[in-house]
Image (tube, helix red, strand yellow):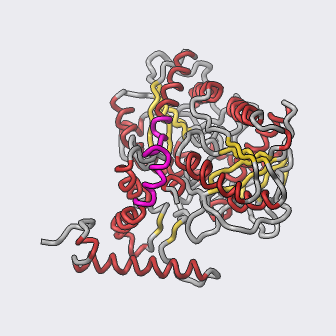
Amino acid sequence: MAAESIAMLPWTISSSIPSDHRLLPRGALCVSQSHSSAAPSRNCVVARYSSTQSSLLFSKDSLRKCLRPLKALVASETLDVPTTPFTGDDKVGVLLLNLGGPETLDDVQPFLFNLFADPDIIRLPRLFRFLQKPLAQFISVLRAPKSKEGYASIGGGSPLRRITDAQAEELRKALWAKDVPAKVYVGMRYWHPFTEEAIEQIKRDGITKLVVLPLYPQFSISTSGSSLRLLESIFREDEYLVNMQHTVIPSWYQREGYITAMANLIEKELQSFDSPEKVMIFFSAHGVPLAYVEEAGDPYKAEMEECIDLIMEELEKRKITNAYTLAYQSRVGPVEWLKPYTDETIVELGQKGVKRLLAVPISFVSEHIETLEEIDVEYKELAMKSGIEIWGRVPALGCEATFISDLADAVIESLPYVGAMAVSNLEARQPLVPLGSVEELLAAYDSQRRELPAPVTVWEWGWTKSAETWNGRAAMLAVVVLLVLEVTTGEGFLHQWGILPIRR
């Protein structure tokens, strides 16, 4: 399992997709709603998965009616927004948020440690929370050799930082070309430059207005939301940051420039096939645990499916009417994830006689191990074994000019709302998660600050239908017991290996 995919709350492989899973109907979203009054509810958009049906559908008008209370919650007051984005005395900064990844093979083990030390990735029972870091060290040491093989196969490290730095520089140039002399910073969740490092540089530069821009097109409490939680804790502890005005662009999947850029890449790759009209367009998105959507009200699934709908509408305008489908990759742990799964869908398409497949990594804007190794190698190999004869893959957006220019426009359009509780009405297409500050967005989508269901849960009392899950939990409990003995006695193989310090 690739480390980056675990962190993004993401992919693997299994079987059984309903036979009716095929195309996403134009003009509909795969999500159901649950509300009986106009009262704001963070569970207003709730997707329920049925084992007999791959998606539940209702209209966009219905969805927007459901989301109106949430927009009202964020836009708690109507403000007269200035027509100019900022005054001459303002120092504008843009903070790009991303996951991070090991740049060299030597970085793999410490990167994995940072990853598994996050309680949103591995959840220990409250009684054993003090073992989070020792357990993270233990798992990272065990997994590092296998993970290094994956990174070695793509050049010896993740290109994520290099690409994100390039995107930041191109965004800075685009903003200056549009008369906005902003500085652009990169903050990673699990590797350098860490978000904390970026914030320190922002303070040193004296930034007075900050636009926070997660490089995840669709909002999820597991990606953008996780970074917002971190920012909230950083902001709360620093007087400078408390007084610094900021706003967050939580998602931008609906923006015209992004949709156009994605359609351009798809159209270009289709032309490389001998019969472009016969190609199945296969959107593969990062998965999240089903409980995030059903229990925590994560809008990710709804945003992802609307994003696909908008891209296909744009392609249809170009007379491209290929069949298409959406699946979710990278599930880990014993919990259920969003379905259908990418690997199962590939097998099913091969069984149905699909011969030409164009993979579109829809939730990625940069190449990294999930695109270069998991999609390009693992899923391609699976496709060939499943009867698919011709495989293609759309590249990640990277520094594509239309995409970067549109990100710059998104930043500029958000500037009048920095420090204001207001929702931008500048775009005809509105995201399901509107503009707002860190506090406002968390109040709307994470109001109870509940612990999210972890994708890897270490022992949880209760019965399970899966013997594999039960055995896995028993094994992890044994690991916890061994760690307790190591910590309490000061003896054992972790001390012998130097992972834990030897008592003197």
Residue 382 lies, with reference to residue 219, above or below; the image says below
Q: Which residues are magenta?
A: 144-164
Q: Within the image, what quadrant is residue 161 found in? A: top left
Q: Position of residue 328 (x, y in %)?
A: 67, 56
Let me know if residue 44 appears in the view.
no
Q: Position of residue 395 (x, y in %)?
A: 63, 38
Position of the C terminus, as image quadrant, is bottom left
Q: Residue at x 38, y 49 (%)?
A: 105
- Please state if 364 lies on the left or on the right of 146 as rendered: right
Q: Nearer the viewer, residue 218 or 412?
A: 218
Q: Position of residue 375 (x, y in %)?
A: 62, 50
Residue 424 lies, with reference to residue 295, above or below; the image says above
Q: Residue at x 62, y 58 (%)?
A: 288
Task: Report the residue that reaches farthest toward the left.
Answer: 504
Count the marks: how many?
Answer: 0
**Residue 155 colored magenta?**
yes
Let me know if residue 79 appears in the view.
yes
- Main SS class of the magenta portion in the image: helix
Residue 177 lies, with reference to residue 375, above or below; the image says above
Q: Nearer the viewer, residue 7 or 352?
A: 352
Q: Within the image, what quadrant is residue 273 found in? A: top right
